[in-house]
Each structure stands twice: as C-alpha cells, then as structure tokens.
Image: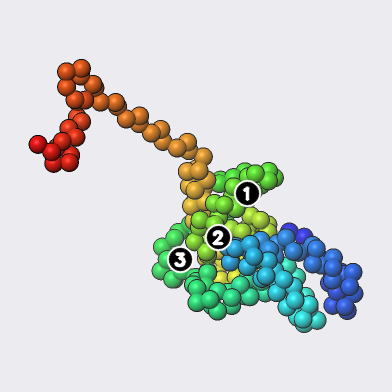
Amino acid sequence: MAEPSRELIAQAQQGDPQALTQLVLSQQHYVYSIAMSVLKHPEDAADLTQESFIRLFRALPQYNGESRFTTWLYRLVVNLGRDELRRRGRQVPLTPPTLEEDEADRLASVADEDRWTSPEQSLDSQEVRSQVRRALEQLEEHYRLVLTLYYFDDLKYADISEILDIPLNTVKSHIRRGKDRLAAILEAEEQPPPAQAVPRQPRHDADGPRTGAVPVRLMFGGA
C-alpha cells in the first residue's frame, strides 16, 4: 500500500490535474481490490471503483489529515459498497459479532504480527495471488473483506478497525478465523482428486448369460 505524500494530496486538493491523476494511479489497484471483495463481480467492482474516485474528487477538499489518507479513502469505498448492497437488498458484510462471541474467543486479542504465517508465506507469485483470490471468494463476506485489507492492501489491524468501523479485537478475531478457513480451502484445493474405482467387468460364462446380468426377456416382461 502506497500512502500519498502530503504534498501530492495538497496539490490534488487545489485541483492540480497531474496530482489528481497520480493520486488515482497510486490507489486504483487497492480500491478495486476492496470493491471486488465487497461485490465479488468484476464489472460491479469496476463501477464501484469509478464511483469511489468520483466521490473522492468531490470530498477531497474536506480531507483534513486527521487520519491517514488511505484509511479515509478505503472507508469511503467500503461505505459505497455497503450502500450498493443495501440497494440490492443483499446482506451487508461485516456485522460485528456479539459481545459474547468476542468474550468467548480468548485468542481474539492476540495479534499475529507475522502477516505471512499460514495460509501462505508470500504473495509475490502471480499464480499464488490468483489462487488466494479464488479461495477468498469462498469465504463469508466479513472474513473476505478483512483479509483483503490485511493481505492485499497491506493494512495494519488499527487501520482496518478504523476503515470498517469495528472493534480492534473483532478485526483480530476475523483475521485469525479467516486465515484458518482460508488455509483449509487452499489445502483442499491442493489435494489430488480421489481415484475413481474401475468397475469390475461381470464374468461371462460360455453356457449362460453373464453373471449378474438380467435376461432381456425379464427386463421387458417376456416369457
């Protein structure tokens, strides 16, 4: 994730076309990644990405630097995605778990500082990235979005908490549980398909029908 410089943001706020273009180019990959995680369809994600930057240009003068620019932008993308899901009558992702669930999860407050601990050690390979993307699509929406922000947008726990407006412990819990589920999916995909048993051919006796075969006259009611 590339955090734009204050100078670039200030120039963009003043309407500098070159600064605005550079701002979009530096963030479009991350914005599209979040849009895909929310909507799961390339065309929908592209539309949401475009709408996000249109909204960004309108809201840019109001950005005051109280939070990181990327945190501010990604929160805008997530909120637009949630609005779109509501318009479609679909479930909005990332409903925080109940207090009882958080309290029952004793590991929720334990932060895994090694981002590349299982399920995968590196996303340098395009093939690995594609494999992980496909596996993420099989996760529940709240796990999918949190892990996208964590792995592909390289955000910290606190940033994710602020972007999604959920408690820090919930972020940690979602990441830990989501990583376990993601690892299980990746492991299952690596397993070779079970060998299919070759059906045994029925024996054929020279003086009679094949063993186990039904005489044709019985099948069709003949005498």
Which dot, 1 or 3, sits closer to the camera? 1
Q: Report the Cα–Cα distance between label 1 and label 3.
A: 32 Å
Look at 66% across and 61% down and name the residue there: 33
Q: Quadrant of residue 206?
A: top left
Q: 78 and 195: which one is in front?
A: 195
**Is residue 100 in view?**
yes
Please name the amino acid that badge 2 sits on.
Answer: Arg
In the picture of the structure, the residue carrying the numbered disc 1 is 130
Q: Earlier in the sequence, mark 1 or mark 2?
A: 1
Look at 84% across and 68% down and name the residue there: 21
Q: Are marks 1 and 2 in contact (CB under 8 Å)?
A: no
Q: 97 and 51: which one is in front?
A: 51
* Image quarter in which the N terminus is found: bottom right
Q: In the rendered image of this protein, does residue 219 appear above or below residue 181?
A: above
**Is residue 161 in view?**
no
Please name the amino acid that badge 1 sits on.
Answer: Ser
Instruction: Decide: few, some or many residues near mark 2? Use Cα within 10 Å; few <14, some 14-19, many ≥20.
Output: many
Secondary structure under badge 1? helix
Identify the disc placed on residue 144.
2
Q: Residue furthest left?
A: 223
In the picture of the structure, the residue carrying the numbered disc 3 is 102
Secondary structure under badge 3? helix
Look at 63% across and 55% down and name the residue there: 151
Q: Earlier in the sequence, mark 1 or mark 3?
A: 3
